[in-house]
Image (cartoon, rainbow, N blue to C red):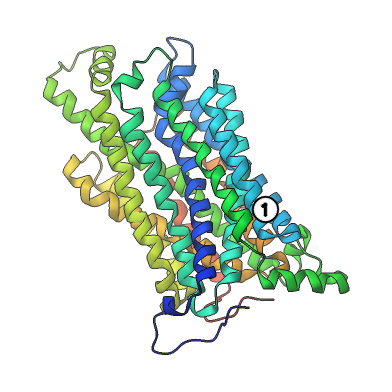
Amino acid sequence: MPDSSPVPDSPWYKNVTRYQWLVLLIASLGWMFDIFEGQIFVTTMKEAMPSLLPEGSSEGTAARYNDIAFALFLAGGAVGGVFFGMLSDRIGRAKTMLITILIYSAFTTLTAFVTAPWQVITLRFLVALGVGGEWAVASAMVAEVFPKFARVKSLGIFHASSALGSYLAIAAGFFIVSNEALRNHSIEGLNWRLCFLIGALPAFLTIWIRMRLKEPESWVKAHQRAKTDPTQRVGRLRDLFTPQLRRNTATGVCLAAIGLATFWGVKVRSQDLMRSAAERDIVAHAQLAPTAPPAETKKLLADHFKPLKRWEMTGLFLIMTGGMVGMLCFGPMSERIGRRGAFLFYHAGGFLSGILLFVFFDQQSINFYWFALPVFGFLVSGMHAGYAVYFPELFPSRLRSTGAGFCFNAGRLLAVPVLLLRGFMRDNLDWSLSRTSAVLSCLFLLGFVVLIFAPETNDEELPE
């Protein structure tokens, strides 16, 4: 059992054992690839979906299919997170982590061979089953293996590793999707299909998991208690709604719903800001007549596919880099001002940065976004590390993975209507990207209300 006593006058990392570092490394790699499996669709969707539609289909048709794919991805994550969270409490963290990684790896790889939009949408749902489950299992395991003096910082590092998965997806977009030779290859869509083939890599991680990881001692003790006390049964979903835990469960679900709705509704779309600025520069440089038909502008931009794709990936890189720093800062901040204080800071920052970026500083130059996007990413992403830090602290060992998985992934499910609302505002109200993003940024304000009722867990041991 890891020593939870503080070690004076010594950096927290000096007293972490080799095995604890190994657990953090494996969990972080699983989470990194987990994020890659989700972000690779974001990287390729502008190329993949149009290439699968009949010739002459509109951009709006492709956008609607992409929104459906996003919605099914969130729904699949919710189902997988709840199911595999319960399974983890019942059969063990290491075994369940292995299963989830194999699932998201296999179905991402199969996406490379699709021939129709419905196949992409179906596989996105199946990929999400593993993606949703892996986070719940890995976060619970890191929380249980690390001692109290290192738990918050280790969980912050764990969640911040998501940025590495985004970097891998960005690199695929920058060097593979934008590759003209692959794009014009005789195999239709070879450039984006190769990106999904990278999804096979995480399967090799499962060999390491099988060989090196063991179940946390707190999980073992919870199973021993369950054998003698029927009230301590492990992995029962309904136990999350007992009088002792329903406040914690409601808090976790609401926080996750706000963060994930704004992630998919605001943050993901903000990567287009730098590309849009580049498009304006290209059109202005070409000096097209104001009366030029839309087809002429479309052809002009298509001729600049490679630089535009790279500007888009650069924007995503800047956002994710700021986001990684924000997530790394959540742990130390939450130890100083409490979990509620840290969440409040990032919800306020997310709202203010969204309003400033999409209302007061709309339609800016490329140079502006070099600075603005990292700041925006920092403020809207930092709270996501809080889910890995906070959710395991809300539930006892017998329900830790079940509770964390339910909160995080019920939040995914509640984010689905936001995607549908965004599509409605775009297609039916003809609202711009900036206008829809500004409106959805107001969701951060709901976090202020949730935090009034949130329990404070700073400086407390994990509940047994």
Q: Residue at x 44, y 22 (%)?
A: 60
Q: Residue at x 31, y 19 (%)?
A: 181
Q: Is residue 190 left or right of residue 247?
A: left
Q: Is residue 447 left or right of residue 137?
A: left
Q: Residue furthest top?
A: 55
Compare residues 345 and 381 and report the one nearer the observer. 381
- Residue to which mark 1 is pinned: 96
Compare residues 457 and 112 and report the one nearer the observer. 112
Q: Quadrant of residue 226?
A: bottom right
In the figure, 431 relative to 2: above or below? Answer: above
Residue 106 on image: x %, y %? 59, 36
Q: Quadrant of residue 183?
A: top left
Q: Is residue 182 left or right of residue 335?
A: left
In which quadrant of the rendered image does the N terminus lie?
A: bottom right
Residue 224 on image: x %, y %? 80, 72
Residue 19 on image: x %, y %? 54, 69
In the figure, 134 relative to 43: above or below? Answer: below
In the figure, 52 relative to 223: above or below? Answer: above
Q: Quadrant of residue 45?
A: top left
